[in-house]
Image (cartoon, helix red, strand yellow):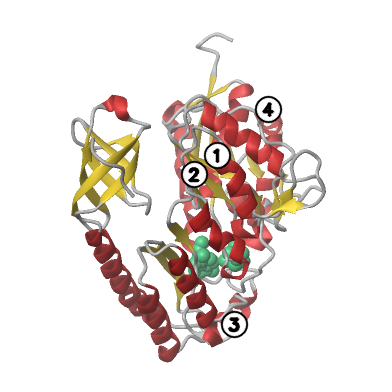
Amino acid sequence: MTENSEKRVFIRTYGCQMNVYDSERMSESLAKAGYAATDRAEDADLVVLNTCHIREKAAEKVYSEVGRMRQLREQRGKGLTIAVTGCVAQAEGAEIQRRAPAVDLVVGPQSYHRLPELVARAEQGETALVETDFPVESKFDHLPEERSASTGAAAFLTVQEGCDKFCSFCVVPYTRGAEESRPVDSVLAEAERLAGQGVREITLLGQNVNAYHGAAPNGAAGSWNLAQLLRALGEISGLQRLRFTTSHPKDMDDDLLAAFAENPKLMPYLHLPVQSGSDPILKAMNRSHTAAEYLDIIERLRNIRPDMAISGDFIVGFPGESDADFADTLKIVTAVNYAQAYSFKYSPRPGTPAAGVEFHVPEEVKSQRLEALQQLLNEQQLAFNQSCVGRRLSLLLERPGKEDAQLIGRSPYMQSVHVLAPQHRMGQIVDVDITSAGPNSLKGKITMAQKAA
Ligand code: 5AD
Ligand code: SF4
């Protein structure tokens, strides 16, 4: 194929890291079908909008973006295939094309291996292409073998997909389907390949990653849990840091807690959503744990690894949430002392049990509660960052900074740290003395001396 006849794909990714991972895999399989990636929609022959359905705002974004792409197609008078993938595709299916007829094809997360074929059919003029079935075969049967050479020093690796928890506010069990783990052999093979390409840090991904139970390697009977998988990954030379996300409190077993002490490559940072600090609300959310059980996990974690940094997710204004319930959320935040967190106003999602109940919290109350919660979480984040000033931390240099000769890396606790360093140190792990801290990032100086935490 000559340069000129090569087609181009522009992929826009919304939502979680799972979508980031999926977009990279789609980009690779489309590359094999002759589509080079571009970061300019104006140059594209194919646009893929990889969407998120978790909250209403996220889901609505896709329609305005389709509108922009349709305009682009009209302005330039040249063909542009518009594909919608991800969780909005799965949840809304054919409804997307009814609302936005400019969309040529709709492909759910279970059918990405068919994307090149579906794109080819759309280009030949086939319309109303919607592929959202849950096939009987495994979610992990169709992963492409090779990763593109552009992988940086830190990479995501999906090991588990789907969710069986059915929290009453959440669309994930419907859009991503039943929980399934990727076999150990396949995970280790991909991790080895990544390490061979210079990846130093891997984040294992799954909607319920700590429920991992992948088929044991080498045809052995039974399955491995996440702690076992992390142990084997820890033996891959070249790989120096391991993380995993997102976890559910119910699946934080003793093995996994112990891994934070026993596995030297496992970073002292855990994203463990609690959603609310009120037991009646946790019950209504179908979270299957209490506030006390969550706090007990945090306490045991910190006994095992005192410098453990905790991150979380919160929902305010869940139906029926009273002032007293919300006060309990502030209470649990104070008790945990988060290094970082995400918080959201409850957003009713069609088809989820919570959307149908009465006693929805008024919008202005949700806003007030969100503001109060975020103020507390921001104070905690700043205090945590400031507590790192004067410490020596290890840093994986991942990307260039805005200033000359500046690189940005991640600390063990997931903070972004800015340092002065020549470009050729990108991808290396260096020791840094932290000199200052703001709400969202730190500054430091690379040291040649002694090893850091
Ligand atoms: N409304 C608001 N936030 C939600 N989340 C999931 N579903 C909803 C919803 N309907 C949040 C939860 C979850 C995170 C990924 O998004 O906090 O942990
Ligand atoms: Fe959604 Fe709950 Fe499953 Fe997380 S555990 S993906 S919040 S249903």
Secondary structure at numbered mark 3: helix
Specify which label sits upstream in the sequence, 3 or 4: 4
| C-beta proximity under 8 Å, tags 4 and 2 | no
Q: CB atoms at circles 1 and 2 under 8 Å apart?
A: yes
Task: Name above or below for residue 393 compared with residue 239.
Answer: below
Label at residue 13: 2
Labels 3 and 2: the sequence-earlier one: 2
The residue carrying mark 1 has its beta carbon less than 8 Å from ligand 1: no
Whichever of labels 3 and 1 marks the residue nearer the N terminus, that label is: 1
Measure the C-alpha gap from mark 3 to mark 4.
Answer: 46 Å
> Counting residues from the N terminus, which is met first, the one under dot 1 or under dot 2?
2
Image mark for residue 23: 1
In the rendering, which numbered label is found on residue 120? 4
Please give the residue where the numbered disc 3 appears in the rendered image. Answer: 284
Q: Nearer the viewer, mark 1 or mark 4?
A: 1
Q: Of the residues shown, which amino acid type is indicated by label 1?
A: Ser
Q: Nearer the viewer, mark 4 or mark 2?
A: 2
Quadrant showing the N terminus: top right
Q: Percent x, y for residue 353? A: 65, 75
Of badges 3 and 2, the one in the foreground is 3
* Helix, strand or loop for disc 1: helix
Helix, strand or loop at label 4? It is helix
Tell me whether circle 3 and circle 4 mark residues in contact (CB < 8 Å): no
Residue kind at label 3, given as amino acid type: Ala
Q: Check disc 2 and give the amino acid type.
A: Thr
Q: Residues within 10 Å of mark 3 (few under 14, many from 20)?
A: some
Give the answer, above or below, for where 424 lies relative to 303: above
Q: Report, in whole angstroms, how far the alpha carbon at label 1 lies from the one at label 2.
A: 7 Å
